[in-house]
Image: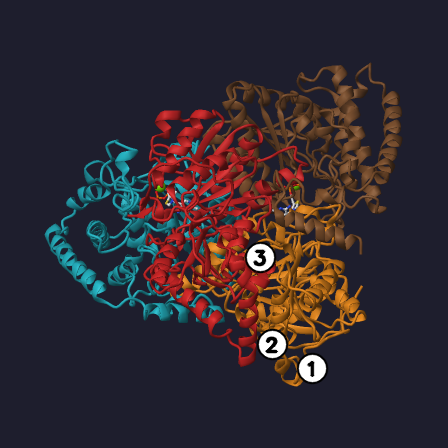
Chain colours: A red, B orange, C brown, D cyan
Amino acid sequence: MVEALRGALAEEMERDANVIVIGEDIGRLGGVFRVTDGLLERFGRDRVIDAPLAEGGIVGTAIGMAMHGLRPVVEIQFADFIYPAFDQLVNEAAKMRYRSGAQFAVPMVVRAPAGGGIKGGHYHSQSPEAYFAHTPGLKVYYPASPNDARAMLLEAIRDPDPVIFFEPKRVYRAVREPREDYEVRERARILRPGEDISCISYGASIYECLEAAEAAARRGIEVEIIDLRSLIPLDEETLDRSVRHTGRALIVHEAPLTGGYGGELVAGIVERNFAWLRARPMRVAGIDAPFPYALELEALPSARRILLAIEALMRESEEALPQTVFGDARDSRQGGLAAARTEDREPKNDSGVKKGDEDSVEGAMEIK
Amino acid sequence: MVEALRGALAEEMERDANVIVIGEDIGRLGGVFRVTDGLLERFGRDRVIDAPLAEGGIVGTAIGMAMHGLRPVVEIQFADFIYPAFDQLVNEAAKMRYRSGAQFAVPMVVRAPAGGGIKGGHYHSQSPEAYFAHTPGLKVYYPASPNDARAMLLEAIRDPDPVIFFEPKRVYRAVREPREDYEVRERARILRPGEDISCISYGASIYECLEAAEAAARRGIEVEIIDLRSLIPLDEETLDRSVRHTGRALIVHEAPLTGGYGGELVAGIVERNFAWLRARPMRVAGIDAPFPYALELEALPSARRILLAIEALMRESEEALPQTVFGDARDSRQGGLAAARTEDREPKNDSGVKKGDEDSVEGAMEIK
Amino acid sequence: MGGTIAVERILGEGGALIREPLLRIERRFVVYEAMLRQRRFDTIMMRAQRQGRIGFHLGSEGEEAAILGVAEALADTDFLVPCYRESAALFHRGFPIESFVDQSVGNARDVNRGRQMPVHFSSADHRCLSVSAPIGTQIPHAVGVGYAAKMRDERIAVAVFFGDGATSSQGFHEGLTLAAALEVPVVFFCRNNRYAISLPVEEQCRAETLVDKAVGYGIPAYRVDGDDVLAVHFRACKALAEARSARRPIFIELLTYRRGAHSSSDDPTRYRSEVPPRDPIQIFRDHLYTLEAFDEEAIGRRIDAFDRDLRAMLRRAEAAPKPSIESIVEGVYAKPTRTQLRQLEAIQAAREL
Amino acid sequence: MGGTIAVERILGEGGALIREPLLRIERRFVVYEAMLRQRRFDTIMMRAQRQGRIGFHLGSEGEEAAILGVAEALADTDFLVPCYRESAALFHRGFPIESFVDQSVGNARDVNRGRQMPVHFSSADHRCLSVSAPIGTQIPHAVGVGYAAKMRDERIAVAVFFGDGATSSQGFHEGLTLAAALEVPVVFFCRNNRYAISLPVEEQCRAETLVDKAVGYGIPAYRVDGDDVLAVHFRACKALAEARSARRPIFIELLTYRRGAHSSSDDPTRYRSEVPPRDPIQIFRDHLYTLEAFDEEAIGRRIDAFDRDLRAMLRRAEAAPKPSIESIVEGVYAKPTRTQLRQLEAIQAAREL
Ligand SMILES: Cc1ncc(C[n+]2csc(CCOP(=O)(O)OP(=O)(O)O)c2C)c(N)n1
Ligand SMILES: Cc1ncc(C[n+]2csc(CCOP(=O)(O)OP(=O)(O)O)c2C)c(N)n1
Ligand SMILES: [Mg+2]
Ligand SMILES: [Mg+2]
């Protein structure tokens, strides 16, 4: 993914002289993850700015740049260090267009490597996307694959609004795929079609979901995997179509459960698709704790935990409603729902889940 | 409410010499809302600190104070100005106990007037509680009444963990009630019992909910109103008991809908009480926009919008499931659920909703 | 140390000039009139606030020289990055006062579409960034605008304003740090009006002067008597010219005094009782009296006319329609989200209830 | 301006003393040995990291004089508020190196219970606050601890460390602002090792020196040759004593050089190639050679023994059990939440799969 991001930056800087990159250690060092490697030599110091250690100043300066014609792409060294820029992002960038009656806009991208799995402990593992998803005026992208990263970064740079662009750092070197150019346009993507459960995720967790789905498939459960890609705006259609088809929703993310974006996803899904649900939606998320070091794999939503949830979801919807003590309730409800959904389930071609279409990349990615 | 808060501060400062207050304009001026009025004269400059304009520094300093035996109570002049302290709150205060293996703790309270309704526009109206509710290690309190504010502030100061304490500024002067001393202990409170809908809210919105409930009652709909009081930790029992009783949940908050704490509440309610739900839970929230000035009353979750949601919730659960095109689904599902819930609904004394007990303050508060 | 930097002055005792100003005589009358107009403006707006006709006002009583001295020195192509107290500077660039009044009322004609509190103005047409309440956040924006101008090879300067209290903020530190590192054509005007709401500057900062702070960033700094409009104009001209040509940041502390309340929400009697220094309008007037062409009466008539005009503007602004309900979700993003559209529907439904 | 503040030195050419140090002769050997031990420690830990035995290390090669000169000056009752590069100071206060090794491995014996990355130490017993990665955040904490000590009438000082890069951070600006306003007994030790990862200090800050920054806060400042352990110790003693008695902040820039990589994740050949200055260990050794009692061989033997000990510690640390699964949710709050307990259950169930 690193190469895909670097390629997108270089391509867009070549195409548009107003694009500049700014961040800590992004010039001479090429970024701690080398995403900006070679850009300094190619585009010079004026457009590749090694900034002082001041995230708020970097983002604040980028806002000013964006207000006068540049297209700044900020690198925050780790998403964990984005908080000194929180005020600038939440109170300034997010509100600029609205508060000025669209006299000013902030076409800025803030890239930040996020997520765990690299033994980074508290401060090199965080997934702060929910903070930004709750901030009207900000867009939040979170690509999971190299080609998505490439396409989405190009789109983010060209977007008239500020985009917080999280990069799953665990995937930086782990995932490679042959380059392909396509548009993402803030649409979710069905990575794997399935009949039984809609598993919705983003970022590195996608790969855990895929692994869990394989295991589930061996047990006869077909999990449809949806990679949101864009959290804000949210592609409700793809979600709703899938959930109405499967009747079961499972949300997976690395960020702590409580108050995470998963809550919003569940709430929205339930609000929009209550009648189609065969079981309570479930969430598998990071633990409600600072990201731990020694036990980081336990803290993360692993394929195992996802698989357990998949099984629970099937079990509950087919055998019993959760926590209920009323036998009649389960039965009649299930009967009712099962009946209700027959119509929807049978004509699979209408379900909107086109198997094998260009949005389905099953197997195309390999985790290294 | 201002007097209740001031009284609690004075009382606790009297009782415990380690309690200090720090913030902008809190000394000579007594705070822009006068919550700290008179404290400087009474407790002196060492314990009532008029701080420079640096929220991050104020909170960071308070963290250090708390780590060496003091009990600092920070005032952030408006919740909208808490973001410069975001890094200190989220990366430092929240993680201190955990990361140090409980060698250090941060018994600190950060008070912040929050919410709209005073014509404050973008920067004197925000409700940022969801950011903190998503931060493991922080507690989030949000009292709605003077006596709750008093009790909860005392408990927050004595708490060993950092507490973000939002005060609904719209209520500061509007609501008065005879002083009563009791314990809150992070429990939700049923402000008004009801059979039909569990309406869950906190902060100033509570009063809109009460107003809507009155109107609904006139139409024969009995809305149970739950004031969360403590968002983190969350009193799941009270919520679940109520939702299982009514089968319908409505969440109301001022913060923008998307990614708000309402999403978490809906997700949790659905996860824990799916079998008991007669209708999709609904949310009435602030608009997904920076808090506007001229149209602030439209942006807020008003009694009218709540009433519409109440009616929709009743209609949908009794007449039709939302967005469904399958007649049989609605019917069989409703039948099933109705059957399921008979047992739960009938013996009202077991429902946990004790009418008229000391937790029910119906009518005790008056809005001025 | 900074404390030894002398305070620059041009206006001496009895209106005599200590050194030759850069402001031509005809323009002195214009600037004086702008100062008077601003004073009248603030008085009327503050009264309108007291009467409940507008929700909030924040004036610049006593700081007109500091603000207008700079405004007069700006070229039209320069950027103005205001704090919140510099409406006079925006008016001086030709922004219609009626537009400010519309903004204060929050009606449909407001360029900000009624979304911001009064006094949170902005005007892209006048190269004036958007006022926001959080203190100090505009300082890095100015740096960014300056950098963009430099990259685009525009020979312009950026003037950013902030208060003494703002020097404690993150935006100040980060803005000055970035400005020095990126070598931008930005002039930092620190209006030291001696108070951050109730906190005297001595308690904000223990350095002898605020220009001491510039030292730590390696940014050249000047102290100017902010109540001496000719001195402010002089130093601002020099600094802006240097910023435009040498493309580097300069820091200027303008020593002044906030004569009024912090804003319409404030009651300064709670925290101060000292006798204010001499009014900058009086100080300038002493000088204008020494000039033959000074026609005080004509100016007075125009100010009275302005007074009437302003009252009419207020009436018109109040009579103007409120912003449309759609404006509540428009423009958060270039394109509204589905959730926003659903919310708009719910709001409309509630309205019709 | 600050640039004119002379750099303090005690060690001259060939180990001669320019002025009388405060460090007694016996203690010089102790400090020297601590410097050598730290160098050995970093070497072994860095190697352990390369071998994959620990996940991360961050050493202090070249900065031992700056760190240990201060550590030696601290009283046991003083607080140490570290950045991340000052493990030597913690060891000097008696913190067992084995405990650091346990922390680096993240085993069940780690006082932090395996929750933080290596090098993120803490020890309440040694009055050493908890290292966190975000730069500069510890600076206001030091101010708060100092204030608490003052309120409790303790005659102690707080020593807070941070790097040159950290002077651009919010914590620096806000910490120094608050320190000056609250008059706290805090000594700010800025280890200017000339780099913030890859960025040379000249590009972080355009002031001539970093002590220039202290001027803006009204905090007295000193520049010391940080490679001269006697000079560091001298100034640290004076400053800490003054902080304890006069209860006011003092700023000290320690001029040094980061000889190694920023951390085990860094490759400095990508961004620098200059010849490093002379090694502070060599500089100090020159002086010790002039002292009769200097028994280099005995020290060498003890360092070799330490080397063996450290390897054994590593082996023991690796053999020790991992933290319990419960530790994953314990201690976030004084009392775990229901959600946390449910999550713990889910994790346990997944483990048993
Ligand atoms: C981040 C932030 N904190 C607090 C406030 C509340 N507040 C508004 S103005 C002000 C004082 C500003 O003082 P100064 O910078 O000297 O400007 P002046 O009003 O004197 O022109 C404060 C504390 C704010 N607007 N933003
Ligand atoms: C807020 C924040 N931004 C970025 C980083 C990444 N980072 C870690 S160390 C460092 C450089 C620190 O330099 P300096 O303060 O000089 O300390 P030194 O490492 O040289 O001792 C950076 C940028 C961080 N840890 N925290
Ligand atoms: Mg001021
Ligand atoms: Mg350094």
Looking at the image, do the residues carrying marks 3 and 1 touch, with CB atoms under 8 Å apart?
no
Q: Nearer the viewer, mark 3 or mark 2?
A: 3
Relative to D274, A291 lies left or right? right
Q: Position of residue A10 (x, y in %)?
A: 40, 30
Q: Pointer 2: what residue?
A: B241
In which quadrant is the C terminus of chain C drawn? bottom right
Q: Cβ(mark 2) to ligand 1 < 8 Å?
A: no
Tag count: 3
Q: Amino acid at mark 3?
A: Gly
Task: Tell me where residue A167 sits by quadrant.
Answer: top left
Q: Pointer 3: what residue?
A: A268
Q: Nearer the viewer, mark 1 or mark 2?
A: 2
Disc 1, SS: loop
Q: Chain of mark 3?
A: A
Q: Pointer 1: what residue?
A: B357
Question: Which residue is more in the foreground, D130 or B145?
Answer: B145
Q: Chain of mark 2?
A: B
Q: Residues within 10 Å of mark 3 (few under 14, many from 20)?
A: many
Q: Amino acid at mark 1?
A: Asp
